[in-house]
Amino acid sequence: MYFPSKLAPGSILGGRYQIEKWVASGGMSYVYCARDLKLHDKKWAIKETITVSGQNAKLEEEARLLIRLNHTRLPHIVDFFPPDEEGYTYLVMDFIEGVTLEKYIADLTSLPPIELILHIAAQVCEGLDYLHTYDPPIVYRDLKPTNLMVDQAGNIRFIDFGIARQFKVDQPEDTVKLGTVGFAAPEQYGGKQTDARTDLYSLGALLLYLATGGQLSEWRPEVQQMLRIDDKQQNTTTALMKVIKKLLQYEPEDRYSSVSEVRKALQLEFIQSSTDRSLSEKSESTRTKVIAVIGVSGGVGTTHTAIMLAYSLLNHFKDVTLLELTDKSSAFSRLQSAAFKTRETGASSGERSFTVEGVHYCRRPTRMEMLDMISGEGGLVILDLGSDRSKETFEEFLRADISLVVGSGAEWRFQDILSFCRLSASYSRSKWIYAIPSVPMPVIQHLRRKLGTSRLLPFPHETDPFHPSDETVAALENVCRTIISNNKPTRLFKFGFKRMWRGGI
């Protein structure tokens, strides 16, 4: 249905929302980006729709539905303008900076790695699970790549609830049959009522779309052959494809019964396959390794330690990348500015990625960028987590091959280490290594007793982390010996660190 829009850049809606630009349009609506004149610099998305006779109630129902919902994956509506005399109505909701999932996949140069598919699937399942367990349950009915956004942090967001409906137990079929060809379940074309299993069919179509790089959303005989073209996707034909096939069953009763069941199936399949145990289907010995470095408090030298690790291990990996994940630090920005002034990097100071003496640096990468870096082969990624205490930061810390906690060598700051351990008591600490620079062994032994661990080490003092001494390199090689390739001998214990380091782990 075509209709002319009443909005244009510069126009003001409701005396408050000034239209800045057109964003998108579909068969039933226009979407604009608007600036809030009362809350300066705050941007909102304005969805303009025109109703036909008898549809006013449906639009108001959608608005009431969105107002009640509260989940990070779903759009948050903040204002609603009911139909005017000509039937024009407006929804004001979160404006999401990013691209549609369709565009994101189209911009990839190869098939998405398995961990990226699973990362997207997990977030979509979060949103669907919230809707399906709502009281009464809500069926989304239009899950597709153009209705999902990838925001600047790499998170998936649902953006359109135009045909969502609440499930009614006593209703034999839907009054309106809507959906997108290729992603809509068979029952959406008439004769049956849609329920949670309808969205699960669309989830299967979406996963197939991702696995084939945006080429297919319906099962065809050539799917298996298409995926076998790329060696990286071999495991998807045995694990992920099994889940997708069940999701795409014609009869709803032959699919999984709930999002929770899908999550369990995905987890079970990939725990049993090598894909979940090895990033990007690489063997354990060749996949990119990850070291996460976190400080017990600010100013303990977390970034200093991360840089020292990068240059100490540079000769053992094909490439070394250092990622700054916290937005509270300016260390990388200052380093980039200094490097740019001395022409040691080809990047301008405004870019987030740059290289200094063989080590790649990236400031605040998105989740998608991180997955791309970690999914490589033969490399090392070091995560500088600063002193952040968020749940997401600790998840990254726990996932790493080596989880390094940095504390201060000043005696008056030892309490920071003990406080950090108390605050993180709910997390598994079986593989954590505590690094305390420039501290004598009697103090180390005292702290070990306090913490109840022998994995607290006296790190060497290094004034220049970009050019670590041979002694420092040998010490850090020993700490990281579990991830260093066996093909290249290290300088372990070469400079008299045997007694000091061997008893430390």
Image (cartoon, grey):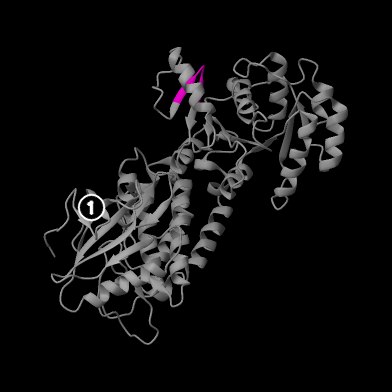
Residue 330 in view: yes
Please determine whether, in this image, residue 280 is positioned above or below residue 246.
above
Given residues 245 and 49, the one toward you in this image is 49
Quadrant of the rendering where the N terminus is positioned: bottom left
Residue 485 in view: no
Dot 1 surroundings within 10 Å: few (below 14), some, or many (20 or more)?
few
What is the span of residues highlighted in magenta in the rendered image?
Answer: 354-360
Given residues 168 and 42, the one toward you in this image is 42
Could you say where residue 399 lies in the image, as x and y percent from the top left?
61, 44
The mark total stands at: 1
Which image quarter: residue 251?
bottom left
Could you say where residue 116 lies in the image, as x and y percent from the top left?
45, 46
Disc 1: which residue: 24
Could you say where residue 294 lies in the image, as x and y percent from the top left?
64, 37
Residue located at (36% from left, 71% from top)? 65
Could you say where residue 460 lies in the image, as x and y percent from the top left?
74, 21
In screen coordinates, is 199 left or right of 495? left
In screen coordinates, is 497 left or right of 46? right
Please determine whether, in this image, residue 103 is positioned above or below residue 136.
above
Given residues 416 and 461, the one toward you in this image is 416
Q: Which amino acid does label 1 sit on?
A: Ala
Q: Residue furthest bottom?
A: 170
